[in-house]
Each structure stands twice: as C-alpha cells, then as structure tokens.
Amino acid sequence: MEKQEKIYVAGHRGMVGSAIVRNLEAKGFQNIVSRTSKELDLRRQMEVEDFFKEEKPDYVFLAAAKVGGIMANSTYPADFMYDNMIMEMNVIHSAFENKVKKLMFLGSSCIYPRLALQPMKESCLLTSSLEQTNEAYALAKISGLKYCEYLNRQHGTDYISAMPTNLYGPNDNYHPQNSHVLPAFIKRFHEAKMENASSVTIWGTGKPLREFLYVDDLADACVFLMQNYSGSETVNLGTGKELAIAELAELVKEVVGYSGKIEFDTSKPDGTPRKLLDVTKLNALGWRYKTELEEGIRMAYEDFLERDFRKDR
Ligand SMILES: NC(=O)C1=CN([C@@H]2O[C@H](COP(=O)(O)OP(=O)(O)OC[C@H]3O[C@@H](n4cnc5c(N)ncnc54)[C@H](OP(=O)(O)O)[C@@H]3O)[C@@H](O)[C@H]2O)C=CC1
Ligand SMILES: C[C@H]1O[C@H](OP(=O)(O)OP(=O)(O)OC[C@H]2O[C@@H](n3cnc4c(=O)[nH]c(N)nc43)[C@H](O)[C@@H]2O)[C@@H](O)[C@@H](O)C1=O
C-alpha cells in the first residue's frame, strides 16, 4: 500500500473501522474514503456498485457488518445472516469488478466448530458443527471468507481474510442486551457503583472461557497483514490467552472500583464453552499483541466515561 493510494474503510464509524482509520492515519495514509450506512447502505447492490465505480478504491478493509453479542445473535439470526451475507457479497463482488488491488475481509472466531480442538488452528474450519447461538452469523462470515478464496482461485485476486477473537476498546457498543460481554460489564459495574447497588448480575454460569484483544492492537494487525500477507487461508487474530467470564467480571469490577457482590443468572446462555485462537501463524508472520487485558480495560473504561453513554446502540 502506497501512502497516496485510495483506501476504502467500510464501517469507519464502528469500533473496528474507526480503529483501522486511526491506525492508517498514524502511519501516514492520507487517502481514506468512507461512507456511513445512511449515505451508503451496503445491502443495496446498485448503490454499492455505483460507489465503487465512482470512487475506484485501490484497497478495501471490510469492517462493516451487523454485529452483536450472544443475545443479539441468538434473538435475530435471520437479520444476522441476511445483512451480513448480502453486505459482504456486494462489497467483495464490487471490489472485484472494479479491480481493487487487495481487500481484507473481517470475520470472527465463531466461524470455527463449537467443540474444535483448542487452541483453534485456521485449519479446523468446517470440520464439525457450529455453536447454535451464533450459527447464522458464522455461516455468513464463512461465506465471505470462502468468496474471497474462490475469487483468488478463479481470478487470481489478492483478497485476504482475518478472524479476530472477541474485541473491546474505544467506541464499543454498550447496549444493555445486544452488546458483547466486556462493554456490558463496564456499563453494568459502573452503573452499580454510581447507584451503590449491593450486587451485579451477570449472564450464564461464568464458566465459559474467552479471549480478548484490544481493538487498536487488532487494527494494527489488520494493517500489518494488508502489507505483509497474501493467501486464501484466513489468519487468526488474538492474544493466545484466555480467562473465565467470572474472572473477567472480577477484573472489570476492580478496574471500575465497584465493591458489591457478583451474582449469576443461569437462565441466560453460556454459548460456546471455549474459543481460544491458535495465533502461531500470526506470530510467525511477525506480529504480536501489545495491550494486556487489564490495561486495555482501563483504557476502554476511560473512553466509556468520556463518551458519557452516548453510544448505546
Ligand atoms: N466486536 C467484536 O467483538 C468483534 C468484531 N468482529 C468483526 O469486526 C467487524 C466490525 O465490528 P465492530 O466494529 O465491532 O462493529 P460495530 O457495530 O461497532 O460497527 C459496524 C459498522 O458497520 C456499519 N454497517 C452496519 N450495517 C451497515 C449497512 N447496512 N450499510 C453500511 N454500513 C453498515 C456501521 O455503520 P454506521 O455506523 O454508519 O451505521 C458500523 O460502523 C465485523 O466484521 C465483525 O464481525 C470480529 C470479532 C469480534
Ligand atoms: C465476538 C463473538 O460474540 C458472540 O459470542 P460470545 O463470545 O458468546 O459473546 P458475548 O461477548 O456476548 O458473551 C461471552 C460470554 O459472556 C457471558 N456474559 C455474561 N454476562 C454477559 C452480559 O451481560 N452480556 C453479554 N453479551 N454476555 C455476557 C455470555 O453468556 C457468554 O458466555 C457472538 O456474537 C459471536 O458471533 C462472536 O463473534
């Protein structure tokens, strides 16, 4: 990627897209194009085609998607499949039609089988059944990854995909039901502290294990791969470290400074028991995460306080 070349970041207002824009700008890339979903609804094929014909980007980071935590995924599976499938097909196809030099498609670690051997290597894709709570989203993400692979195979394109683990950081979604666990905890423990509540209830048993990557590290990895990786097999983006949800709750409680009890609502789903990424491939390419979890949670909490609850999607 040359500094003057045109880069389209799809989803630039989201947590990931905004971090990719920050990273590109910090590295001196000056020709970044973007559109909000109001300006360009990526589910509309004609609009996407017109945009690509008009803008002719050289590079594309596809970070626009319908995204949510376990509850959103299990409540709205039809929306998660339709929106994601159609958005990614429209963008990747228009990129191909307009000779985009390189595209990065972002998936998620939930594409791997529910009971995959841990840590999960890229090669375990499609070896057994998916987790039910996010099957629709995972199927859409697998389709995007595969479409990039098929274009590479049939037409010799250089379209890559990356599979991030659970992410968190500035500009996250703090919706009480639809968000992911980490922003949900930041908001819930903060509110409990402000209200002097005696306890905070978290979903499930607290036993599932999860891995978390700070979004600015993720953005750095995306830009790094765009510059240093080609190939149809996806690349896992994570830290290689995991902790139980109950341990995460203790950590957020400490960072936020809440002193009450933690209770568990076991009527809520646990989701997949464990999904630790094998990051051997990423490390071998020369990239490693920088931000440890506690430090990242502190920075995310500061961002949450600065935004003053404005982001509650
Ligand atoms: N958050 C996480 O923990 C993880 C995220 N990922 C992946 O990273 C990517 C980005 O996620 P994240 O930043 O968290 O999500 P966000 O919800 O923060 O941002 C999603 C972005 O997508 C855009 N978008 C949604 N629908 C449309 C549409 N119909 N047309 C145009 N744009 C649309 C939104 O644009 P606008 O703001 O203009 O409405 C928004 O900026 C996704 O591919 C996701 O799968 C992968 C693993 C974990
Ligand atoms: C990124 C990833 O995100 C989703 O998968 P998930 O990892 O299950 O995501 P989650 O962050 O929502 O939950 C993690 C764990 O945490 C527990 N948990 C406790 N209390 C709360 C809580 O208050 N909110 C939430 N959301 N979870 C809670 C919850 O029960 C679960 O055990 C998919 O969308 C998937 O498609 C995907 O890609």
Image (cartoon, rainbow, N blue to C red):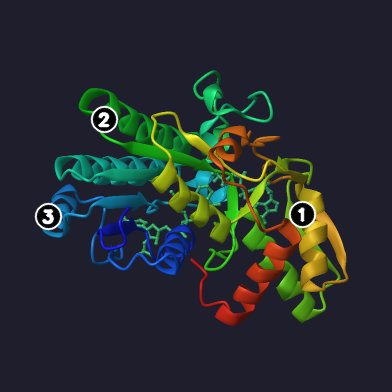
Residue placed at 63% from the left, 62% from the top? 183
Asked whether residue 179 is in view, the answer is no
| Badge 2 amino acid | Leu
Secondary structure found at label 2? helix
Secondary structure found at label 1? helix
To which residue does mark 1 refer? Answer: 248
Q: Earlier in the sequence, mark 1 or mark 2?
A: 2
Q: Nearer the viewer, mark 1 or mark 2?
A: 2
Cβ of disc 1 within 8 Å of ligand 2?
A: yes
How packed mark 3 is, by other alpha carbons closer than 10 Å (few <14, some 14-19, many 20 or more), is few
To which residue does mark 3 refer? Answer: 50
> Do the residues under discs 3 and 2 have CB atoms within 8 angstroms?
no
Q: Earlier in the sequence, mark 3 or mark 1?
A: 3
| Cα distance in 3D space between marks 3 and 2 | 21 Å
Residue placed at 82% from the left, 78% from the top? 196
Residue placed most toward the observer, 14 or 180: 14
Residue placed at 11% from the left, 58% from the top? 54
> Do the residues under discs 1 and 2 have CB atoms within 8 angstroms?
no
Q: Is residue 292 above or below residue 111?
A: below
| Cα distance in 3D space between marks 3 and 1 | 45 Å
Q: Is residue 81 left or right of residue 245?
A: left
Position in image of residue 115 (x %, y %): 65, 25
| Badge 3 amino acid | Asp
Q: Earlier in the sequence, mark 3 or mark 2?
A: 3
Secondary structure found at label 3? helix
Q: Is residue 267 above or below residue 142?
A: below
Q: Is residue 300 above or below residue 58?
A: below
| Badge 1 amino acid | Leu
Residue placed most toward the observer, 42 or 303: 303
To which residue does mark 2 refer? Answer: 151
Residue 146's quadrant in the figure?
top left
